[in-house]
């Protein structure tokens, strides 16, 4: 008689190849580290070759299996070429984490058209292109995990970031639509919605006493998040432990989206 898998073993990712976009720093790097700690071979991605190499070397220094692929996720041809090269040289991508994203701030009526276009190309179009390139290869294999990084702004609004909110709301619905299309082929598609985390991109907000005070008071856990606290959600959704979770957005936000 076959014994059921130990629940702790079901979180392991041994031997699986994962591509994490926008992973030379911040949330992406934390997600990559977590996946690698769970046994995955991880391909880091970024546009800055020096930062990407530094991130790769840092994780290798921790004894983790990490490679690097420098390409711009906002360029469809570059994405297609990179995915093809990764699969040829390293093996099938079994886990894709679409993390790359940017932020631009301005009042709605003053928001520049060029900034709107850049933000949408990076935050939304890139998710579609990378997922499509990887999913086309996952389909014949009948398995795969795709995780799109959404945001609490997939559900909520804040002044000065209308395009960002629009992009992350779209990523949420893109995730659900992909889950419906790809689920019958054994591919799960889910999202992680981070709240406010201590990253370099948020440094101005962290240093803004008024904003930080408002946020801490608004968040039921009464603090900012630490990027390492996102890794467990990624490992769960990428692993066999989450094999029946599909089309779900897991908010890791200290309770922010539950509070009024």
Image (spheres, grey):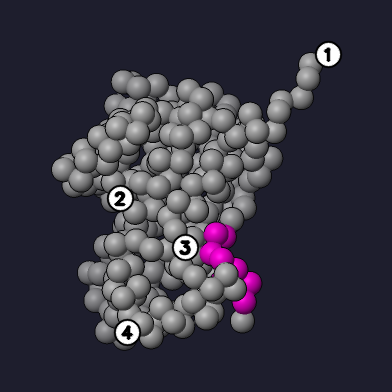
Q: Secondary structure at mark 1?
A: loop
* Few, some or many residues within 10 Å of mark 2 (<14, 14–19, 20+): many
Of mark 4 and mark 3, the one earlier in the sequence is 4
- Stretch of the chain drawn in magenta: 251-259
The residue labelled by disc 4 is 107
Q: Which residue is mark 3?
A: 225
Q: Earlier in the sequence, mark 2 or mark 3?
A: 2
Determine which residue is flagged by label 1.
1
Residue 235 is drawn in which quadrant?
Answer: top right
Q: Quadrant of the C terminus?
A: bottom right
Please provide percent x and percent y for residue 249: 58, 56
* Disc nearest the viewer among 2 and 3: 3
> Dividing the picture into quarters, in which one does residue 67 lie?
top left
Q: Residue at x 37, y 76 (%)?
A: 161
Q: In terms of sequence position, does the residue under pointer 2 or pointer 1 come before the other?
A: 1
Real-space CA distance between mark 1 and mark 4, rounded to the nearest whole angstrom: 64 Å
Image spot of residue 83 (x, y percent): 34, 32
The reply to whether callout 4 and callout 2 are in contact (CB within 8 Å) is no
């Amino acid at each position: 008689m076959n014994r059921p898998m130990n629940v702790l073993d079901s979180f392991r990712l041994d031997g699986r190849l994962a591509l994490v976009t926008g992973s030379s720093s911040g949330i992406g790097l934390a997600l990559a580290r977590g996946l690698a700690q769970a046994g995955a071979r991880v391909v880091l991605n970024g546009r800055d070759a020096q930062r990407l190499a530094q991130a790769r070397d840092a994780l290798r220094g921790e004894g983790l299996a990490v490679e690097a692929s420098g390409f711009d996720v906002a360029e469809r041809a570059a994405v297609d070429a990179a995915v093809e090269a990764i699969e040829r040289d390293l093996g099938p991508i079994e886990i894709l984490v679409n993390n790359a994203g940017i932020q631009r701030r301005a009042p709605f009526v003053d928001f520049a058209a060029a900034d709107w276009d850049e933000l949408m190309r990076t935050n939304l179009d890139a998710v579609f292109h990378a997922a499509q390139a990887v999913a086309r290869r996952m389909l014949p294999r009948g398995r795969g995990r795709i995780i799109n990084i959404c945001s609490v702004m997939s559900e909520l609004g804040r002044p000065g970031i209308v395009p960002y909110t629009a992009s992350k709301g779209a990523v949420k619905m893109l995730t659900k639509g992909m889950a419906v299309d790809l689920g019958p082929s054994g591919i799960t598609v889910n999202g992680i919605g981070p709240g406010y985390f201590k990253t370099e991109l948020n440094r101005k907000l962290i240093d803004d006493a008024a904003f930080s005070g408002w946020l801490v008071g608004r968040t039921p856990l009464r603090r900012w998040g630490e990027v390492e606290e996102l890794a467990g959600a990624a490992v769960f959704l990428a692993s066999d432990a989450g094999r029946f979770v599909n089309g779900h957005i897991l908010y890791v936000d200290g309770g922010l989206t539950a509070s009024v």
